[in-house]
Every structure is written in C-alpha cells, then in structure tokens.
Amino acid sequence: GEIMLKLKRAGTNLSFMILGFLMAFVGVTKPDSAAAAINDIKEKVAFGTKNSPVEVYFVSDWFCPSCKKVEPLINKLYPEIKSKVVFYFVDYPIHKKSMNFSPYNLAFMINDKTHYFKARHALGELAGKTDSPNDEDVVKIAKKEGLNFKELSFLDVKTGMEFFDKIVDKYDLKSTPTIIITNPRKNSVVKLEGRDEISEEKVLN
C-alpha cells in the first residue's frame, strides 16, 4: 500500500509536469504560429524586389482625399524603384468604412499582382460610389477591367489586416497618406507624412 501511494504521488507530479509543459508549449506555439502567418501574408502582398534590404510602405485610407492626390505619384515612382526595394500597400482605416475595401484590396494584391495598379484604381473609383462594396460590385469591375478577382479565405483577410495593423503600430502612424522607407539591416527609418511631405525627390533620395 505504501509503495502504491508513492507511485500515485509520483504519477500525479508527473501529470502536473506534463500538463505544465503542454500549457507552456501551447502558449509559445500560438504566438509563433501567428507570427508565421503574418510573415507569410507579408510575403504574398509584397511587390518589387523581395530580397532587397529596403522596404517601402505606402499607407493610405480609401476615403482619404489627400491619399487620392498622392496615388499618381506612387504610380509614377513604382516603376523607377521596384528593382531596388520591396514595396507594400498598407490600409490604415482612418475612416472605419475603409475596412470594407481591405478584403478586396488584399485579394487583388495576392491574386493579380500584374494588374494590381489597375485594380487599385478601380477600387478607388468604387469607393467614390459606395462605402459598402459587395462581391457583386467587385466582380463587375473585375470583368470590366479584365482583372482576376478571387475571394480570399477569412483567415487570409484577418491575417492581412493584422499585418496592416502591425505596420501602423510599429511606426506609430497617426494619419494618411504616409510613406515609410526603412532598411532594417541599418536600423534606418524615414517617415514622410502628408501630401506636403511626400515628394518624388524625397522618396528617391
């Protein structure tokens, strides 16, 4: 009986050890898997030269008048810098209904990079007509413009929006439009905020 009691106590202690290990493992695994998912979506939405140490983020809102005025500059600059940088378009919903466009924006970024600028322009025009687009609206403009629209899974949309939020938080952004130019290897960051600060010369420099 005494031996069995000792074995029982040892078994209980072992059970608690295993339970503690499992809880610690789950606690570590969840953040790791979330970080891996964000890194994966970051890879999918990247434009330009993916092995470049220089990262450029254009942060905008679908209902921001100043953002619309900066868009032509982005269209002009991208062909000049795409061989030198990895480029990202980041939605920062200053206007909350801008979030209605993020799933479609992400879908075009991931599934139709070749025609993304055309898709971006079409979504911008749609934002001028409605603040609550639906699949039918987007399918219609995709057919009209010859775009490849394929709906993303909920998980991809959620992760994509988490990636956007991560950039906004990391660089302490407060407004749109903003361009972030960073070289993580050199720990250098240049932040150009507002239409008056964003210029061709500053971006190229």
Image (cartoon, grey):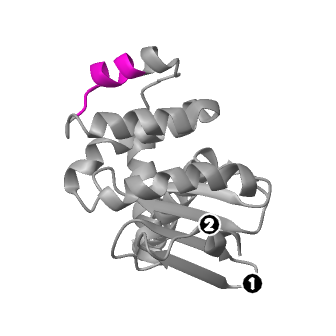
Secondary structure under badge 1?
A: loop
Secondary structure under badge 2?
A: helix
Q: Quadrant of residue 1?
A: bottom left
Q: Quadrant of residue 124?
A: top left
Q: Residues within 10 Å of mark 1 (few under 14, many from 20)?
A: few
The answer to whether residue 136 is above or below residue 177 is above
In the image, the segment drawn in magenta is 133-141
Residue at 48% x, 77% y: name it: 197
Number of labels in the image equals: 2
Residue at 52% x, 17% y: name it: 146
- Identify residue type, mark 1: Lys
The label nearer to you, 1 versus 2, is: 2
In this rendering, position of residue 135 left or right of residue 56: left
Earlier-in-chain disc, 1 versus 2: 1
Residue 194 lies, in percent from the top left, at 41, 72
> Gap between marks 1 and 2, in whole Å?
23 Å
Q: Nearest the camera: 184 or 95?
A: 95
The answer to whether residue 88 is above or below residue 18 is above
- Identify residue type, mark 2: Glu
Q: How crowded is mark 2: few (under 14 residues within 10 Å), some or many (20 or more)?
A: few
The residue tagged 2 is 200
Question: Is residue 138 part of the magenta span, yes or no?
Answer: yes
Residue 29 lies, in percent from the top left, at 52, 61
Residue at 39% x, 52% y: name it: 68
In this rendering, position of residue 29 left or right of residue 79: left
In this rendering, position of residue 176 left or right of residue 145: left
Question: Is residue 124 part of the magenta span, yes or no?
Answer: no
Which quadrant: the C terminus?
bottom right
Tell me, yes or no, if residue 80 can be seen here. Answer: yes
The residue tagged 1 is 186
